[in-house]
Image (spheres, rainbow, N blue to C red):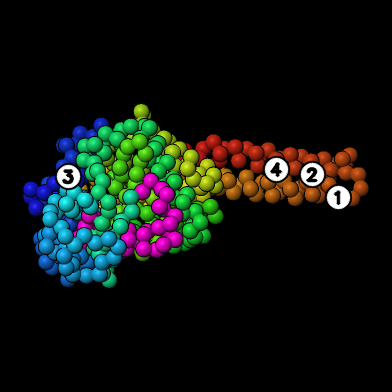
Amino acid sequence: MADEPFWEIPVEPPKSHTSKKPVPSSEVDGSPPWYPSGLTAEALDASTLELGIRTPWGRIWGWNYNEALEASWWEKPSGTHWGVWPSNVDSVRVVAHTQNKIIVALDEEFIVHIYPLQTGSDVSTLVRYKPWGEILKDEHVILPIGGLQNENGDQLCLFPYHEIHTPQEVAQHLQNRNELHALGGAIGRVHSAFEQEATPNTEWRWNARLKAIEGTLKTTTLWRAPHTKHVQGLPAFNISLDGILWGDDVTLIPQPRPLVDVLLCESERMPALATLANLEQTIALRGGFGESVPRVSFYAGWEAKTPPTWGGRSLRNLKGGVWIWRYEAILLELARARAFQQPEAESMCMGWLNDVSRIQAKLGVLRMTNLGAKSSLMLLLISLGTILFAGGPFTASSIGIGRIVLTSAFLFLAVGLHTYTDRNIPEPY
């Protein structure tokens, strides 16, 4: 495997950071990027993956993917295949190992994503569940046309042959403001296409996910949030940096559910913002964004293609907003860093988490002022009611004047607290 390419963009520390040049995790112990060497002392043995790998976070299931790297295996594969299946294969070329798969070219006619460690059937379901396949057929996505699976989920998926960008090419695209805007738009189109399949807000389950992740990682942070009714769950369309094709139009290739997500928490219908924030943090940790390429370009591209109720005030933080999903994304990045032995990434994630208490303290004050504004408004309405419906003349009496003064005080208090809250909410970008 040493002569096979590893597809990996190492984490980039801040320019003020004085540590050594980041080293890809695959160079630490020679294991491929998809093997969680930080969770097990067992050396990689493809022939025993179907027996499972025991880790402190749970058992990981896989299969002997080496079989699929032989051309003869494709004539009589072991397992249940669906869709298009190439039975006459002359050559199998490994293109790259990534953090969740092996990319293989079959006769330069198909691109195959082999999932050595299985994490469910998110990829194949996008096609095999016909309503979703119909929804996505007109979008800028490349969907699988066939595959192999067993009781643990997808083993591999076949795609029409397409270009594979190198990590260096992707890193360059991440520095381009217009291309990040286009990427946000491409994700927004997919999310909007799934609007009719959205499920109602299940914030208690999303908060339970956070609790499960925090508990396993043993972080000192704790963050929960309410969400507006416009924050809805969507079918899973996972995105990773190696699943983005850059061109005149950005094209997305669906990815499997992340391994650490499977190990740490239950599968849930997640909001569009969760997917967006996850990719945002992945890009940020790998050198993307900055003064010349701000996050707003990425989110503005997404907002331009999604329903108005999904953006705007839904991004604000008193009702969850994007910050709670950034927090979850950092927790998952921390889990990846530990699972795949990425000390630089772990250090950066811990640095981000050290600021959580400061962010929460500010949001706590703003929630109190927001509650005060609403309470003042309610008292204002009650006071107006007593003035309007009280019997007899009152303006000349001391009681009437007192009511007017009290009503005015409630008005100024409500306006003042609302203005303070609105001006001090952290920007979503």
The three-letter amino acid code for the residue at tag 3 is: Pro
Picture quadrant of residue 429:
top left
What label sits on residue 390 in the rendered view? Answer: 1
* Residue 392 x/y as whole percent: 92, 48
> Quick one: SS at disc 2?
helix
Circle 3 Cα neighbour tier, 10 Å, few/some/many (<14 / 14–19 / ≥20) = some
Whole-angstrom CA distance, mark 3 to mark 2, is: 70 Å
Relative to 41, 292 lies left or right: right
The three-letter amino acid code for the residue at tag 1 is: Ala
* Residue 292 x/y as whole percent: 36, 28
Front one among 364 and 185:
185
User: From which residue to which does the magenta span run?
Assistant: 112-141
- Answer whether labels 4 and 3 touch (C-beta < 8 Å): no
Picture quadrant of residue 119:
bottom left
* Residue 101 x/y as whole percent: 22, 55
Q: Which residue is mark 2?
A: 403
N-term mark: 2 or 4: 2
The three-letter amino acid code for the residue at tag 4 is: Phe
Q: Which residue is mark 3?
A: 24
N-term mark: 1 or 3: 3
Circle 2 Cα neighbour tier, 10 Å, few/some/many (<14 / 14–19 / ≥20) = some
N-term mark: 2 or 1: 1
Front one among 193 and 297:
193
Closer to the camera: disc 4 or disc 3? 3
The three-letter amino acid code for the residue at tag 2 is: Arg
Q: Which residue is mark 4?
A: 410
Whole-angstrom CA distance, mark 4 to mark 3, is: 59 Å
Q: Is any part of residue 29 visible from this angle?
A: no
N-term mark: 3 or 2: 3
